[in-house]
Amino acid sequence: MQASGGAWVGWTGEVDGPEDTIHLDSIDLYPVPLSATEHALYYEGFSNDTLWPLYHDALRESGFNAPEWDAYVEVNTRFATRIADIAPADAAVWLHDYHLQLVPALLREQRDDLVIGWFNHIPFPPLELFQRLPWRTQIIEGLLGADVLGFQRHRGALNFVAAAALLTDAVEVDSQHLMVVEQGIERVVTVANFPISIDVDEFETKASGRVNRRHTAQIRSRLGDPEVIILGVDRLDYTKGIGSRLRAFGNLLDQGRLDPNRHVMVQVATPTREGVEMYQEERREIERIVGEINGKHGRLGYPVIHYLYQVLPLDELIPLYQAGDVMLVTPFRDGMNLVAKEYVAAHVDGDGVLVLSEFTGAADELRDALLVNPHDEEAFQEAIVQAVEMPRHERRQRMQAMRACITAADVNVWAASFLDALRDREPDPVDNADNADV
Ligand code: GDG
């Protein structure tokens, strides 16, 4: 945003927060407030208790609740109106994520001069799952108000096209374009994948500092100088597969294939959505497993799993990535997973092994990770052993290939490719100096 200019419209993250414009680090922020009830119904309810599980393979049962849907409509309308009020003529508007799927059509109704894009950070589910949603047609119609719809993976874009063709009058022109007819006028919607990435330069610069190297050495020594540090870093979300990963580690200790004197695990689980019951259950289960494994395999002063339920500052996270000899990124479903890419970016030493679930978007690009199906207990355990025992030359070869991959497609490439697709849809070249994007 700083590089390209424009305005940012969003919820501040606090209930009944401020409404006045905030100017911060040369970006104009336009808050859209949420009340406590809307936070419960729209954010924790419809967004995170209905859409989130449904869009992640229905890993948990979704609640389908009419008052939550009403709040979703209400808040989406508020966002659309806020954007319509502030967007300059012909501006490009880039909407983000599953919380705002009705905004494209609501915004187009008010401002047909705008070019509208939407990007989904999470998976878009197969038709068979999406059809469960009582408000499925309204969601698709809301999204079809956009000019460009972006997904992490090709599969997500295909799933959307299939849902739109079945549930609405939209016609598939080709695999990347749908035709919709509004008041007798035809309009094309581009549907494509734009895999997100990270600021690789930022990670490499921070990871290359001397202070950082010292910090990494300190982490090793505080963990008792084990031979191999196995690492997991996730929001504490049931989609991330933290429990099954810990169980795989525990089973290998039980079998004597890993040794608590030589192999330790660090699991950072960041607090998230703590008001949602399923997240409280997941936390209890993870902490139970950690306790069980440490009780069985730890020694006084040397737990075998070091578990942190907290948010680490980035300057602690980067040396932790570097200290990790083996990184386990094993969600059951994930739109992309940035942690996998951050681990690779932080390994400026060219070493380290990534074990990566094939159900992440990142698996499409990081083909030199050890790809696993986290539902396959035996294969999962084998992959951990293979990672721990991998010879140095193979580790370096794989890491080099993964580093080349993330360097070639960093977050700037992602943003530019989406904005280019959006600008391609602008009717006329924009030469108005007052024009800005939102
Ligand atoms: C959604 C999609 C998609 C985590 N713990 C700490 C910390 N983090 C940071 C990581 C990373 C981010 O949180 C997590 O990003 P992920 O991509 O792994 O997962 P989600 O939060 O589920 O994100 C996902 C993403 O959107 C982007 O489109 O990839 O699929 O679900 O950046 O570093 N950061 C700090 N301390 C922590 O303890 N500083």
Image: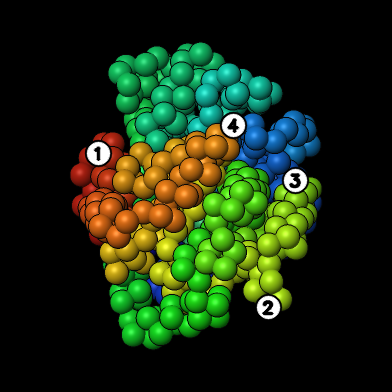
Residue annotated with mark 1: 424
Sequence-wise, which precedes: disc 3 or disc 4?
4
Q: Residue at x 54, y 16 (%)?
A: 167
Residue 395 lies in quadrant:
bottom left
Q: Residue at x 63, y 64 (%)?
A: 305
Residue 88: percent from left, percent from top: 39, 53
Residue annotated with mark 2: 301
Q: Secondary structure at mark 2?
A: loop
Q: Is residue 70 left or right of residue 327?
A: right
Q: Secondary structure at mark 1?
A: loop
Sequence-wise, which precedes: disc 2 or disc 4?
4
**Tag of residue 396:** none
Q: Quadrant of the C terminus?
A: bottom left
Q: Nearer the viewer, mark 2 or mark 1?
A: 2
Q: Residues within 10 Å of mark 2 (few under 14, many from 20)?
A: few
Residue furthest toward the front?
Answer: 256
Give the camera-side residue of 322 and 89. 322
Q: Secondary structure at mark 4?
A: loop
Sequence-wise, which precedes: disc 1 or disc 3?
3
Tell me the CA gap for discs 2 and 4: 40 Å
**Tag of residue 278:** 3
Tell me the CA gap for discs 4 and 1: 33 Å
- Give yes or no for contact between labels 2 and 4 (Cβ–Cβ under 8 Å): no
Tell me the CA gap for discs 2 and 3: 33 Å
Residue 294: percent from left, percent from top: 70, 63
Residue type, numbered disc 1: Asp
Residue annotated with mark 4: 57
Residue 237: percent from left, percent from top: 64, 50
Sequence-wise, which precedes: disc 4 or disc 1?
4
Sequence-wise, which precedes: disc 2 or disc 1?
2
